[in-house]
DNA sequence: ACCAATATGGAACTACTAGTACAGAGTTAA
DNA sequence: TTAACTCTGTACTAGTAGTTCCATATTGGT
């Protein structure tokens, strides 16, 4: 009884519903699930029944109260949005010797990129680039088990643009002495996608305590570090159930590099040519 | 002001939101739009802010009350459900100027991915995955100045799946003694995008001389290493900008990881669980 | 056509939620 | 360091929504 969708419950219960209750049921199915998020009175009016009838209706579905029913609807909507199986309708899951594996993977990665574009506030992105391009203070970079390579990639490129970059090792043992130089106003960019790294969280807390300007790059489920962060750039990484794909995070990093370089060009161009010569 | 989506308003208003209000904004974007249908207190708890902050947040978005905001959310959801072809919610409304830099960059990255899908022969991709999944012999990994991070990323993931992985430093000084163990039939994966690395080319020549099975991952202009390679996977990286974008290469790497893991699952699953335990 | 049983909506009631004021925590500038 | 200011959460109030009860309408059986 627990795991059933509301729509399924309606179909099951339909036969024992009274005439007015059926009107309520049809009203809900007609524009599912939005009308269920409305107050009872509005639901009732739209379905052509009274509030009391709507209440009896949700009671028939097995919900203890109207808020309880709404909670179920919300969880269902969330589930549907988050599980990427919504598009598995067209893609047959894992056939052996799949010739178009790569095509499917790339298609999903494109979806991730699109969603990320919608998820990332342009102002946050721009703010970070401007800050990086200014080149003031020290900028610390840290990542988790896999995302550490992204931090490295970002560092390697930013080195061409500005001074004062330091890589941070989040492991507790080596962390303390790396932190002692952190000054208020320094920048710290932290990569954390699930499974979230506990030691990264500790490191972030300490950086926040030292008044560093904390930037978090994470996935759509939001690392708990978000709590400490001044700026959060969330990417969409969800793939089918097996693994997530960080391609969108990587692309964000490249966009950061490109934009920061563009902004810092007057200064950066000299730097770059002097590096290239050596 | 009327016809704007709630998400659009958030993006517009983001810059004038306070820290706690931004947490609320992110919370809503993270699981949009469901959390907005919850009571204020629940919204607040999930976003890590107080009820009062959430109220101030919706007020900033231009809604006269919380119920007013919820109504807008419902109408928006309805709208999206009713026009089925308009499903692409990825119409992120941005301000003028360079505020849409990120959008443009992502759009171009998507183009790169599409082109790459057309450029990479599925058979070559599959052949490499099968070879990696078999786990025979040693697999060497090397990259250039920036692509070395991609090699590292690939290595970190493949370690979960199979033994016998070694990172190769292409610098002449350290190269010789790393090469002495290379046996015929060993695999070598080399990343080389322009500007192509001379020392990588030398390393590739030597690997080929030692009869290693050489795999080249490169860009559409084809590194000269291609002449030594048994397998070539070319990605589209061109951008209309100063630098190229390696996002498609990264995505290829992730696809390799995913497919290889899938193929090697019977063996890999044991490996992974034993690693996770330690 | 009448009666019994059930369904229905209106109105009163209760509980909970949104809204508000305020105090203290945190931030910034002098 | 201090002082001014802004931000943020708590405690409270007012209002609105959900709930319940009951009179009325409707249905179905005899």
Image (cartoon, coloured by chain):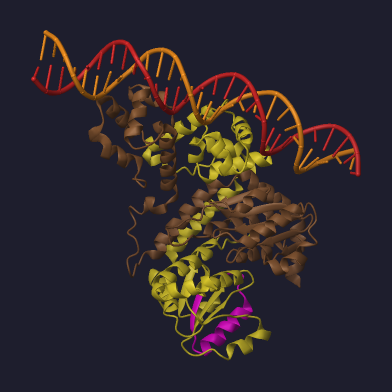
Chain colours: A brown, B yellow, C orange, D red
User: x and y percent of residue B265 in the render?
Assistant: 40, 72
**Quadrant location of the N terminus of chain A in the rendered image:** top left
Residue D25's quadrant in the figure? Answer: top left
> Where on the picture, by quarter, is residue B82?
top left
At x 50%, y 60%, the residue is A245
A139 with respect to A34 (left or right):
right
Residue A137 pos. (x, y %): 79, 56
> Front-most of A142 and A57?
A57
- Residue A264 visible, this angle: no
User: For this view, does A104 lie left or right of residue B52?
Assistant: left
- Vertical arrangement, residue A265 with respect to residue A172, above or below: above
The residue nearer to you, when weighing B60 against D12, is: D12
Answer above or below: position of A153 versus B198.
Answer: above
Instruction: Answer whether residue A151 is visible to the viewer in this image.
Output: yes
- Asked which quadrant contains residue B148, the reply is bottom right
Residue A176 pos. (x, y %): 75, 65
Give, as a single range, the part of the protein colored magenta. B192-216
Place of residue A155 in the rendered image (x, y in percent of width and height, measured from the top left): 68, 63
- When the figure is inspected, residue B268 is found, relative to residue A3, above or below; the finding is below
Tell me: residue B72, above or below residue A242.
Answer: above
Judge whether residue B211 is colored magenta: yes
Query: Quarter of the image containing the C terminus of chain A?
Result: bottom right
B91 within the magenta span? no
Of residues A236 and A176, the one drawn nearer to the viewer in this rendering: A176
User: B183 or A38: nearer the eye?
Assistant: A38
Count of residue discs: 0
* Residue at horizontal 38 percent and vertical 72 percent from the top: B123
């Amino acid at each position: 009884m627990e795991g059933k969708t509301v729509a399924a419950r309606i179909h099951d219960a339909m036969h024992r519903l009274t005439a007015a209750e059926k009107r309520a049921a049809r009203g809900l199915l007609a524009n599912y699930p939005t009308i269920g998020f409305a107050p009872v009175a509005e639901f009732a009016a739209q379905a052509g029944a009274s509030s009391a009838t709507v209440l009896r209706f949700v009671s028939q579905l097995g919900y203890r109260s109207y808020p309880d029913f709404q909670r179920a609807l919300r969880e269902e909507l969330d589930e549907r949005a988050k599980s990427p199986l919504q598009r598995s309708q067209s893609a047959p899951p894992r056939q052996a010797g799949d010739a178009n594996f790569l095509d499917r993977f790339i298609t999903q990665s494109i979806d991730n990129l699109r969603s990320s574009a919608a998820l990332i506030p342009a102002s946050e992105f721009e703010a970070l680039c401007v800050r990086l391009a200014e080149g003031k203070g020290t900028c610390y970079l840290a990542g988790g088990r896999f995302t550490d390579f992204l931090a490295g990639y970002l560092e390697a490129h930013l080195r061409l643009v500005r001074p004062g970059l330091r890589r941070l090792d989040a492991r507790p043992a080596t962390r303390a002495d790396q932190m002692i130089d952190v000054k208020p106003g320094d920048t710290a960019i932290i990569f954390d996608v699930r499974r979230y790294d506990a030691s990264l969280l500790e490191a972030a807390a300490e950086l926040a305590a030292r008044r560093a300007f904390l930037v978090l790059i994470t996935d759509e489920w939001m690392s708990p570090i978000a709590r400490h962060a001044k700026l959060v750039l969330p990417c969409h990484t969800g793939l089918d159930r097996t693994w997530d794909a960080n391609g969108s995070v990587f692309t964000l990093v490249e966009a950061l590099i490109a934009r920061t370089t563009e902004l810092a060009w007057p200064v950066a161009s000299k730097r770059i040519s002097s590096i290239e010569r050596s």
